[in-house]
Image (cartoon, rainbow, N blue to C red):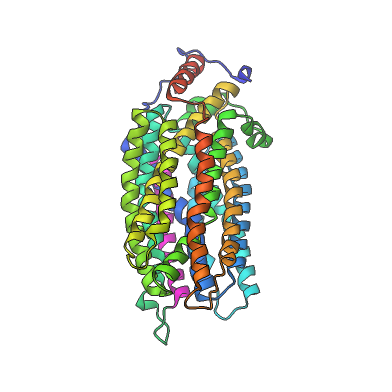
Amino acid sequence: MRGLANPTSTAAAPAPVSERLPMSQKVGWGLGAFLDMWGHWLYPGLAFHVFNVFLGVAPGLISTVQMVKVGVDAASDAIFGWVSDNTRTRFGRRRPFILVGGVLAGIGLPLLFAVGRGWSDSEYFVFMLVSTILYVPVMSCFNMPWVSLGAEMTPDYHERTNVMSIRMVIQQLPALAMFFAAQFTTLAIFNDANGKPDILKGAQAYCSILGALMVVAAITVFLLVRERYYDNLVKRQQPKIAFADTLGRTLKCRPFRTLVIMMMAYGLGTAMVSALGYYATVYFVCKGDVALATKWNTAMGVSGMVFGFLGIPFFNRLAHRFDKRIGMATVLAMAICAFVGDWWLYDPAQPALQMLACGFVAFTGSGFWTLYGSVLADVVDYDELETGQRREGSFSACQSWISKVGIALGVGASGWILQFTGFDSKLPVQTEHAIFMIRILLSSIPVAGLVVALIAILRFPLTAKRMHEIRAELEARRGRV
């Protein structure tokens, strides 16, 4: 496969850009986290709160829509990852999609809750299904080029972790906004004539505000960030990539397969209990008091933001001191402990302890995604050595396709898992059996996935030493970029 490369002598190569990026570039790229978080995760986070708790739609129907949504997302990600790899414009191959997709995603966000009251379950189901299918490709248009751009910003092993760390620091702000979402929908200004919270109206207002911020963030990313490899390598030397290679040739990369197994095990295990934490707070800790639960949910969001901030420098330093593989293994081991601890930290006698439950998960989650993005960039270098092509879009799309299929299965199962516990939304207080099942599954299901992920990362071959060797071979072949 190495014969596909187009060797270029170091002397003839363009002058390299500094591999230490200015803070404006890191922050500019990191602002895309506002769109990534809200465009992908705000709707799933509010869907049960609005459609089940407020409008009374069966949870199985909601989770089915979420499963379809993520499945369509996976397909559209593959298309836009491939298209952005092959695009050639005066603005680069990623940035035009970032601008157009980001602006449209912000405009479309509030439309996901543009429903009426008193509809039948089937009418709500059809609306949710159609609106999400239309919205998903818009988010892919932004997200795949944005993720791909992050993987190509610097060739330096540790600077890649720094880029992802800045992104994760910025991401704590939109993550906090997601925790505040449920409480915002219950604010008194949205109360109906009977003085009860109009959650639907609150969700529509909140999504309108966040959608406007997404538009601003997309424009800012487009203006601040530049593409490193486009002018000096891709536009001059690289032929177009076949669509079949987006999945086929990408999956032949052994380090990538190992990375994907780890990521899918992590994502599937946590997605399957994505609804249970909220219901544990509402019906176990707060005894069915939704207004009180949303306040605790906001407090847990603050806790998650604080712990998430702390996790970023902790795991960044760990990866710098030892190795990204060691750092990721530590993340997964600590995450296992965090989910086991949920059994004791969701406690109605001491409700403040659930802030630690959320905090510990956020601490390890920020470490996981910081190191995962950095490791994915290393895999792209390995692939360039083997194939002679920079295929960030193909790798971003392929990992997204696989992860979202896994998450679709997990999210699709989450509502049925909730029904399996015996939960009944028509009951203000749930049975002891339902509460027990919610608690035990919240702790046990993620642990099973995390154990598989831990085994996978311990088999990952791209150590710091190996990546330095790969970089030296690449620069000897085509010069520094």
Asked whether 398 falls inside the magenta stretch, the response is: no
Residue 286: which quarter of the image?
Answer: bottom left
Residue 191 horizontal/vertical position (percent): 40, 80
Is 311 positioned to the left or the right of 88 in the image?
left
Asked whether 213 falls inside the magenta stretch, the response is: yes
Residue 197 horizontal/vertical position (percent): 41, 78
In the rendered view of the protein, which quadrant contains the N terminus? Answer: top right
Residue 326: which quarter of the image?
Answer: top left
Magenta region, main secondary structure = helix
In the image, is residue 234 above or below residue 363? above
Residue 419 horizontal/vertical position (percent): 58, 67
Of 462 and 29, which appears nearest the observer?
A: 462
Specify the segment rendered in magenta: 198-227
In the image, is residue 295 above or below residue 363? below
Of 329 and 37, which appears nearest the observer?
A: 329
In the rendered view of the protein, which quadrant contains the C terminus? Answer: top left
- Identified at 54% across, 70% down, the residue is 423
Of 420 and 147, which appears nearest the observer?
A: 420
* Tag count: 0
